[in-house]
Image (spheres, helix red, strand yellow):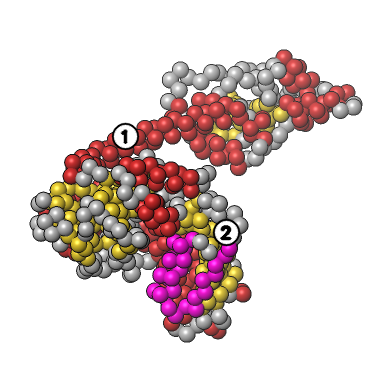
């Protein structure tokens, strides 16, 4: 399956879903005016990847976001929920949640996500330095 | 050699501009003309950047001044080409557009055509027959004017929308000022109008207050605040004893029904993109002075209390469900918490625009800690002073970062 790569813009994150290696990454910031139109194709692509199964190969997800607005929050939650459903069905999913060590809002959001979607193996990855611009 | 006619006096208005509006006086040549003729034309018309070549009324190419002059200046070219047809050096595929082509479309086609249109200009036809040509610089100018005019119209319209949104918040502001003179109300929409709003109304000897943050900002956010406010007002009428659980339940059901956000799980991908999934987060407060009871219900919004003598800010979390969203059940019940407050307690609610704004040396969120520190530092000061400190701290934190969201904060001492 073709990898999904969308470069970052001012208001949208970089999406790099490398399906061949089962590594999925979302990095940057997310506050597009129309979050749905940005995330709908991302969701569709992830959906077909997850449906293909790939013999249950473990999935490694990296989320490294500095900022997202509330509309993006819902859609990021929806992506994580899809991954969680896959994890519930027995496929291993590891989520590395990158946040700045002092960013209490990101820490809190990560904790929320891990509690809501507990089939995913969740790692909070604290970074002493903010992710590179 | 002919000179194209000027555009008709009744040229369409600039906003609905078309290619025909950009016609300039320009000589043309035919294949019967020689390169020597072309040379003389360019020589006599120093401003002429391109020369259309017309055959039987139809454009067949465009001669670019610089390319032509460079070629002609090469050793022996003049001797070899002077008396040959001018088609030798013409560009056989210039941009040709019909006179009725809207300027916007013309600009897209010019870009697709590559940079040469900007230097050489473009040819305008009517039913394929040559009518004249336009220059790249005129096209750029017309597009800039068009954009500036559209931008001005949109900004004027939003500025007026802001007048409406502010008027509609005024009764709440006035009631707040009257009942709680020592208060702080910060309301800063990111884009002139916004999705944050507040509602404050006396109730019995006390009051009901809400600070809410609708999905989106700008114009769509502002639409949502009006929808929400009308549901909140109606719910307040329908719930005279003002149970906040009942109030939020009503607003939730009302919004979900009004926007058709009952259940999207069966919608297919294309349909779900068209459908809204909008709602609000917010904090709802009801104060009864006789018992000194503050009741609170929050949708993804914490209430902050700083009691007299307390060492820390107390954070009372709301429920995790947002109001009205497609994913929130129709029968969702938000928890109402009753808190007895000692006189002098500082009460504060803020939208996520405050907490989530990135900034500071590491470009991370403003967060809760910075707000709590400010509340502690200014716990005894009049609230306008806290407001000043908060605005300054937030501004410093934001620094050069763009504002990400609408910002609102309500605080008072009771």
Q: Is residue B248 visible?
A: no
Q: Nearer the viewer, residue A24 or B90?
A: A24
Quarter of the view holding residue A61:
bottom right
Residue occupying image coordinates x 49% and y 72% = A48
Residue occupying image coordinates x 51% and y 20% = B7
Q: Which residue is mark 1?
A: B160
Magenta part of the protein: which range? Answer: A103-128
Q: Is residue B304 visible?
A: yes
Would residue B154 appear left or right of B341 to someone viewing this image?
right
Q: State how far apart marks 1 and 2 are (Cα).
A: 40 Å
Task: Give the structural element (helix, strand or loop) at label 2.
Answer: loop
- Where the C terminus of chain A falls, by quadrant? bottom right
Residue occupying image coordinates x 41% and y 70% = A112
Quarter of the view holding residue A14:
bottom right
Q: Nearer the viewer, residue A106 or B378?
A: B378
Q: Is residue A115 magenta?
A: yes
In the rendered image, the residue lying farthest to the front is B309
Q: Nearer the viewer, residue B146 or B292?
A: B292
**Which chain does the residue under circle 1 lie in?**
B
Front position among marks 1 and 2: 2
Residue B373 position in % (x across, y down): 41, 54
Q: Nearer the viewer, residue B105 or B248?
A: B248
């Amino acid at each position: 399956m073709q990898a999904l790569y969308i470069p970052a813009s001012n208001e949208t994150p970089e999406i790099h879903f490398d399906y061949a290696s089962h590594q999925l990454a979302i990095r940057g910031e997310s506050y597009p005016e129309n979050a749905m139109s940005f995330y709908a194709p991302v969701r569709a692509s992830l959906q077909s990847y997850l449906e293909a199964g790939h013999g249950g190969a473990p999935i490694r997800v990296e989320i490294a976001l500095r900022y997202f607005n509330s509309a993006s929050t819902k859609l990021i939650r929806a992506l994580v929920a899809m991954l969680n459903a896959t994890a519930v069905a027995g496929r291993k999913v590891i989520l590395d949640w990158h946040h700045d060590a002092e960013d209490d809002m990101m820490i809190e959001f990560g904790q929320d996500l891990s509690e809501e979607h507990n089939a995913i193996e969740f790692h909070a990855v604290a970074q002493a330095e903010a992710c590179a611009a | 050699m002919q000179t194209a006619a000027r555009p008709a006096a009744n040229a369409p208005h600039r906003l609905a501009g078309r290619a025909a509006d950009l016609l300039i006086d320009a000589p043309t040549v035919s294949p019967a003309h020689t390169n020597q003729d072309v040379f003389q034309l360019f020589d006599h018309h120093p401003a002429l950047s391109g020369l259309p070549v017309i055959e039987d009324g139809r454009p067949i190419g465009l001669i670019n001044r610089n390319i032509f002059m460079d070629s002609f200046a090469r050793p022996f070219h003049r001797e070899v080409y002077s008396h040959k047809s001018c088609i030798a050096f013409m560009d056989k595929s210039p941009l040709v557009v019909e006179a009725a082509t809207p300027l916007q479309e013309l600009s897209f086609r010019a870009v697709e055509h590559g940079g040469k249109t900007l230097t050489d200009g473009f040819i305008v036809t009517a039913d394929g027959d040559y009518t004249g040509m336009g220059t790249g610089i005129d096209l750029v100018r017309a597009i800039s004017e068009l954009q500036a005019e559209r931008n001005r119209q949109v900004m004027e319209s939003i500025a007026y929308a802001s007048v409406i949104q502010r008027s509609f918040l005024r009764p709440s502001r006035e009631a707040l000022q009257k009942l709680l003179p020592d208060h702080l109300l910060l309301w800063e929409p990111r884009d002139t109008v916004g999705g944050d709003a507040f509602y404050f109304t006396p109730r019995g000897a006390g009051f009901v207050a809400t600070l809410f943050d609708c999905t989106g900002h700008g114009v769509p956010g502002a639409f949502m605040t009006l929808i929400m406010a009308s549901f909140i007002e109606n719910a307040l009428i329908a719930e005279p004893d003002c149970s906040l659980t009942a109030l939020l339940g009503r607003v939730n059901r009302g919004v979900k029904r009004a926007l058709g956000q009952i259940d999207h799980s069966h919608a297919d991908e294309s349909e779900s993109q068209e459908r809204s999934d909008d709602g609000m987060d917010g904090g709802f407060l009801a104060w009864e002075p006789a018992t000194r009871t503050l009741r609170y219900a929050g949708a993804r919004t914490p209430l902050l209390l700083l009691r007299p003598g307390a060492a820390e800010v107390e954070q009372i979390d709301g429920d995790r469900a947002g109001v009205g969203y497609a994913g929130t059940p129709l029968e969702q019940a938000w928890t109402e918490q009753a808190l007895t407050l000692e006189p002098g307690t500082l009460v504060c609610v803020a939208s996520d625009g405050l907490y989530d704004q990135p900034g500071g040396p590491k470009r991370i969120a403003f967060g809760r800690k910075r707000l709590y520190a400010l509340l502690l530092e200014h716990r005894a000061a009049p609230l306008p002073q806290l407001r000043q400190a908060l605005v300054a701290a937030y501004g410093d934190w934001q620094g050069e970062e763009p504002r990400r969201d609408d910002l609102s904060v309500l605080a008072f001492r009771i």
